[in-house]
Amino acid sequence: MQQASTTDRPAMATSPRRRQLTLDEYFEGVIARDVAVLPRALTLVESTRGVHQEMGEQLITRILPHTGKSIRVGITGPPGVGKSTFIEALGTYLARSGRRVAVLAVDPSSGVSGGSILGDKTRMAHLSAEPNAFIRPSPSAGTLGGVARKTRETMLICEAAGFEIVLVETVGVGQSETMVDEMTDCFLALMMPGGGDELQGIKRGLLELVDVIAVNKADGDNRKPAEVAAKQLERILHALPSQGGEPPTVLTCSAREHESIDQVWNAIEHRHQRMEELGALDERRRRQSSNWMWTIVDEQLKQVVRNNPAVVEMRGDLESQVLEGTLAPEAAARQILEACGLK
């Protein structure tokens, strides 16, 4: 079989013709792991065109019974921690172990800059060459909420196409970690050795989300500092007030040397298995689905209000008054809601 491109990598049956597909063809192609249909299905759900959005929603509804069987892992870390190198090392390890792995991204800057943290897939050239791997850049949806929504839908389609593991990379700014936490089962934070503050790069609120912390670059002269950092992290984390669950598992690894990558995965898989045994995984995913429904309601209500003709007409004047300090933002918001008949 002719190999797929780097974004459409998994070994699946091929489709000879490129034409407009029906909903049935999208559905059947995804379920059949058709290498030509998968990226087209993802493009469909990422589209902002009304006709595409309607069909995309129908496709997501139809594939739902075929989703939920993968291990969903969020991955974050500060700049310079070697996140891309680590994800490539982990993804390659999993793919060569016979697991089918998809790598996705949540990057709120992609809609502004036109770029993506996974836009240059040559950064993961080895992983791109693996027949069991699939890499999908962050969609340019303009807002973090839009990017997260499209990434979640991409994840569901990948699950329906038979991917057993979904790695979701976050750029690590703003609320992107919280967004990724709302669509994954386990959260991994990468850190660097040394620097005195062993919680560098991890915001205090993020500690409540993290399940595993891996101190990367534990090789050469950094090996000993990485081990020291890991032990200090363990002491700090055990001293923090408990959130009712286990403290994060802390270990060291070297993505560059492919050392202890298997141990990091074992720690993630152990957490996932524990969640399943305790019934916490089903509870978490149900809560995520409910939260996601209301997130979409909030986002679409905002668009309805912004696009209301009365609001469009009064928006410039209200914004000017708010900027000049002659009208309180609360009062302006009330006028907008009243114009929409919402208050």
Image (tube, rainbow, N blue to C red):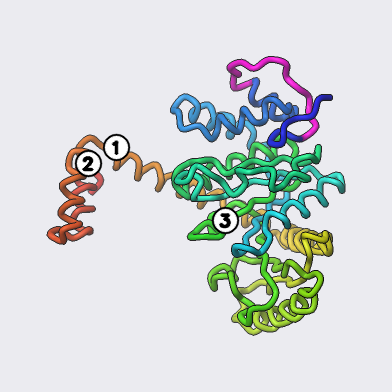
Q: Which mark is residue 307?
A: 1
Looking at the rendered structure, the secondary structure element under dot 2 is: helix
For the question of whether residue 287 can be seen, the reply is no
In this rendering, the answer to whether 19 lies above or below 80 is above
Q: Are marks 2 and 3 in contact (CB under 8 Å)?
A: no
Residue 32 occupies which quadrant of the picture?
A: top right
Of the two numbered discs 1 and 3 on the same chain, state the one appearing first in sequence: 3
Q: Does the magenta stretch include residue 2?
A: no
Of the two numbered discs 2 and 3 on the same chain, state the one appearing first in sequence: 3
Per the image, the residue denoted by label 2 is 311
Per the image, the residue denoted by label 3 is 171
Q: Where is residue 254 in the image (x, y as percent from the top left)?
A: 78, 64
In this rendering, the answer to whether 276 lies above or below 58 is below
Q: Where is residue 290 in the image (x, y as percent from the top left)?
A: 52, 50
Residue 206 occupies which quadrant of the picture?
A: bottom right
For the question of whether residue 27 can be seen, the reply is yes
Q: Do the residues labelled 1 and 3 touch (CB within 8 Å)?
A: no
Q: For this view, does 92 lie left or right of residue 63?
A: right
Which contiguous range is marked in magenta?
10-24
Instruction: Say which residue appears at 76% left-offset and 22% top-offset.
Output: 14
User: Farthest residue in the left direction?
Assistant: 326
Q: Observer-nearest residue: 294 or 93?
A: 93
Q: Where is residue 109 in the image (x, y as percent from the top left)?
A: 49, 50
Q: How far is mark 1 from mark 3, CA to CA? A: 30 Å
Q: How far is mark 2 from mark 3, CA to CA? A: 34 Å
Q: For this view, does 40 lie left or right of residue 140?
A: right
Q: How far is mark 1 from mark 2, CA to CA? A: 7 Å
Q: How crowded is mark 1: few (under 14 residues within 10 Å), some or many (20 or more)?
A: few
Q: Observer-nearest residue: 180 or 143?
A: 143
Q: Which of marks 2 and 3 is in front?
A: 3
Q: Do the residues labelled 1 and 2 touch (CB within 8 Å)?
A: yes
